[in-house]
Amino acid sequence: MGELSAQAICKAFGEKQVLDRVSFTLREGEIVALLGVSGVGKSTLFHILAGLSSPDSGAVLLNGEEVTGKAGRVSYMQQKDLLLPHKKIVDNVTLPLVLGGMKKSEARAIGRQKLEEFGLAGTAEKYPAQLSGGMRQRAAFLRTCLFGGEADLLDEPFSALDAITKRQMHVWFLERMEQLRHSVMFITHDVDEAIFLADRVLILAGRPGRIALELPVEAPRPRDTLFTASERFMEVKRRVLSALSQPEIA
Amino acid sequence: MKKQRNFTNVFPPLLALLLLLAVWYALTASGRVGAYMLPSPTAVAAALVSQAGYLWQGAKVTLWEAFCGLGIGILIAVVAATVMDAAGFLRRAVYPLLVVSQTVPTIAIAPLLVLWMGFGTAPKIALVALTTFFPISMGLLTGFAAADPDQMNLLRAMGAGRRQIFFHVKWPGALPHFFSGLKISASYAVVGAVVAEWLGGDSGLGMYMTRVRKAYQTDKVFAVIIVIVAVSLLLMLAVHVVTRLSMPWEAVAQNEKKEKKAS
């Protein structure tokens, strides 16, 4: 896993400036939450980081190497699970391996084993329509992991889930991360989710959007749900909420 | 439960068919309509039996022509739609021509094809191909254009090239459109072959039809119409089976929806 950094990224759509000199670094093995209101340019930023579009100015660096506008270097999980409806789950999750040139039979063998590790045993031969929302999300995450990029970009990975499933997925996600040690950056609207999962919280705010606050959570991982009731959690939450309520941010 | 639903599905059209036959029989039995105008159902049934040998020979030829023509039509449609999708300029150039070409009546092209290709099976197959490729290529083009941009971005983010995006997202996504086009084309195919046979040749249901029509053997005309319908249905059934086999996920998704509704 690697280190991903954004350097003074600016992006405009026509007259409208969306991102203004956005800079940050996602360090190796770190989980960073990107928090912000709707329409502030979070998904635009992720598109740029994933190399699907180019910034007007600024650069994206991966382990010090410039990868601006180059797709296929980091793993990118979009808001929708985007499992292809015509592929079985095992073929969906191993799609990045097959795209990379691996033989289908080989990829499937790996896929079957990984599905079990991700709590998706018995779903290999099913189609996405037969899975629940939580399972689909997990399958999408497994696909993202199997891509094996140097960093994971997750765009609102848990937003489509109901509250109970969401909490289970949070715990599950942190457990996975204990083993995988990926460098992860994820977008969320949910302050509690950001603090519970992340080592660091970035707030993207304003029009055009810029990094308005960078706040380390400073709580050791792994964490359990009790963390959400701790002093430290409350203190971080207070600071995030007060930052979000400042007029220049809203 | 399922049996009952099958029964309620089959019963109404069956009743309508029986009623139609009864009216038809009554009309011919009354003696007001001459047998050369409208033969009685029993006469048609008798013709079906007595002419079975000719009809079977003709059906084999016509079905073969329809099948080959449809196959070639599919091939042309896939190639044309794929090329047009890949090259925007070609699409803009060729698309209007294609649409206009479909307004030219089949019956007007058929004699030309006979003139160019002779009295063999070639002009028949060509006519079927011409009439069947259009619905399929339109279906495919619609399907390609409807490909989900998010799914394509997903593959791009994984470093996929255009070819890979085509085979993993665009083509499977267009399959339902392809098959709905194919269903229409299959129903055109047999008719296309019959029309081509009217204009010349020494075999096929169309040729047989022309012969008995000129002799005012109306019972045999009706018999051959029934055979044409049967052959068309057979081809459509084949398409239906292939559709189900090619897209197992569609059936699965439909079942899921039904279960959700039921629960």
Image (cartoon, coloured by chain):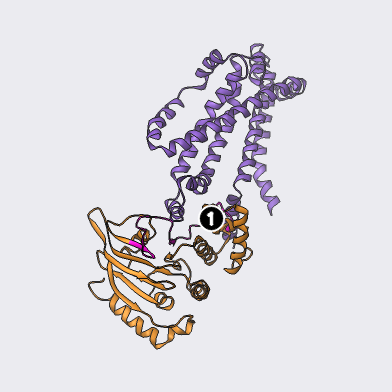
Chain colours: A orange, B purple
Q: Residue B260 location, x and y as percent? A: 57, 60
* Residue A240 horizontal side relative to residue B56, left or right: left
* Residue B35 horizontal side relative to residue A133, left or right: right
Q: Residue A29 location, x and y as percent? A: 44, 73
Q: Foreground residue, A119 or B32?
A: A119
Quarter placement of the C terminus of chain A: bottom left
Q: Which residues are magenta?
A: A60-89
Tell which residue pokes out farthest to the top in this image: B215
Q: Foreground residue, B163 or B196?
A: B163
**In the rendered structure, which amino acid carries the disc numbered 1?**
Leu
* Residue B99 magenta: no
Can residue A36 be seen in the rendering of this structure? Answer: no
* Residue B217 horizontal side relative to residue A199, left or right: right
From this view, report whether residue B149 is shown above or below residue B38: below
Secondary structure character of the magenta stretch overall: loop
- Tell me the crowding category of disc 1: few under 14, some 14 to 19, or many 20 or more residues within 10 angstroms, Cα based: many
**Quarter holding residue A38:** bottom left
Q: Residue B149 location, x and y as percent? A: 42, 51
Q: On the image, numbered disc 1 is attached to which residue?
A: A95
**Quarter holding residue B40:** top right
* Residue A87 magenta: yes
Tell which residue pokes out farthest to the bottom in this image: A231
Can residue A10 be seen in the rendering of this structure? Answer: yes
Query: The residue marked by circle 1 belongs to what chain?
Result: A
Q: Residue A107 location, x and y as percent? A: 59, 57
Residue drawn at the location 38% of the way across and 31% of the way down: B93
Q: Foreground residue, A106 or A140?
A: A106
Q: Secondary structure at mark 1?
A: helix
